[in-house]
Image (cartoon, rainbow, N blue to C red):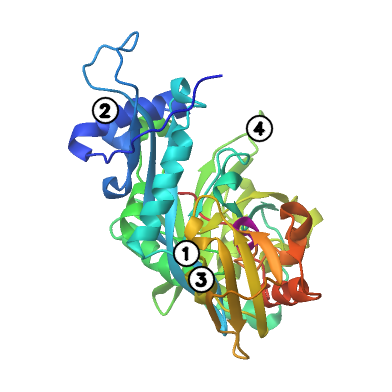
Amino acid sequence: MSKKIEHEVIRLNEDRDLDRLAHLEHATWFSPTEGGSPADAVGPLDFDSTGAVEMPARAKFGQTSQTTPLGGVYGAFDMTVTVPTADGVAPIPMSGLTWVAVHPDMRRRGVLRALMSDHLNRVHDQGRYAVAGLHASDPGIYGRFGYEVASYDVLYNLSHGATLQAPQAISDAAGALETTLLPSDGPGVLDAIHEAHQRAGGVSLGAAVRSAGLTKGDYRDFPKARGSKEKVQVVFALQDGQPVGYASFRRNSEWSDVGVASGSVTMREIFAESEAALLALARRLTTLDLTTSIKVWGRRMDDPLMWWAGGPRNVGVRMGDSLWLRLVDLPKALAQRGYAAPVDVVLGIADEYCPWNSGRWRLTINEAGQAHCSRTQDNADLELPVQALAAAYLGGRSLVSQAPIHGIVEHTDGALTRLSRAMRSDIEPIGSIGF
């Protein structure tokens, strides 16, 4: 086994380090963008929020450049995540961890530990973010760093012409909306996507909402890599000429030997400010010409769209983990969200990578669902790792269900159930966009 050593985490410079980053990206992910440059490989990465570890200084076999290769890197995006509040939902700042990569030659040498520790310490020192989030390429990696699954990504398969049975009031409201289809690279379309994403994401529990720059980065088009696939298309739902929702997607053209169209639609993302806007978008997508099936990602198990379409068996539900959350500033994070019931409980927290979270905290929730969290010397009612609170943070996973997973210890009868019920939301969080 390779010896684990301490690594210095350095800051990167866009002008100087593009080639080093592109090389590491290829070595780690082996999925180059055909026809793309090193800058394209890096994409919308914010260099001010990156951290990297260099290879050891010794000469490396096969190395043709005098520049020291990178052994690992991470990046972070300035985002928000929409959480439960005392009277609904609201977005709070979130550091979106991304681009976590360790060179194959540097595995099991403590590189990932150094990168993750650096990221968590920087987020804490900045003071802007109480929570961090990520998508896990490997679900076995991030739990040990305090992250846990807070939402699921639910996939529906809808058929062309599917009957969507919604209550009459919602159906009528959807019918009053206009829908329009545009290419994502059309004039002003990306700005319209971003504005609709901000508004709809801000009222959608669990939504990870990106910046304007990240929106433009996510919708970049590489014709050579795209090949025969069409450019990303967007359907907007409009009320009085203004977007109240959108769905972006690609169609894949297919024909049978006898000339019967069997094209498919694969959704990139769908956001709506209301149930009526969601229904209007779904109706438009299920009636696109020359298609027979529509894959819709990023939904939830109690989503009205699934039940309008007839339930789980009708839509072939598949589910995986979506947003992983990490409470970086525990008292601030617990005070930023709302609760369903009053509770007064002392939490004994264990947190290896954010030691400032460890210890005993009194969480007091008033009748209005607002919380205050502060250090205390009182005995703990519950002892639990920070991962358990991260899992329950968006309200979709109960704290009670985390007890056999994370070994929650209850010292005061009923404390676990009371806090678990207070943290649950009325609906499940939606699946997160990728970042």
In the picture of the structure, the residue carrying the numbered disc 2 is 19
Q: Residue at x 50, y 69 (%)?
A: 333
Please determine whether, in this image, residue 101 is positioned above or below residue 286: above
In the picture of the structure, the residue carrying the numbered disc 1 is 329
In the picture of the structure, the residue carrying the numbered disc 4 is 256
Q: Residue at x 60, y 85 (%)?
A: 369
Q: Secondary structure at mark 1?
A: loop
Residue 385, quarter of picture? bottom right
**Type of residue at label 4?**
Ser
**Type of residue at label 1?**
Asp
Q: Secondary structure at mark 2?
A: helix
Mark 2 or 1, nearer chain start: 2
Circle 4 packing at 10 Å, graded few (<14), some (14-19), many (20+), is: few
Q: CA distance from mark 1 to mark 4?
A: 56 Å
Mark 3 or 4, nearer chain start: 4
**Type of residue at label 3?**
Pro
Q: Residue at x 39, y 61 (%)?
A: 193
x, y percent for residue 332: 47, 71
In the picture of the structure, the residue carrying the numbered disc 3 is 331
Q: CA distance from mark 3 to mark 2?
A: 41 Å
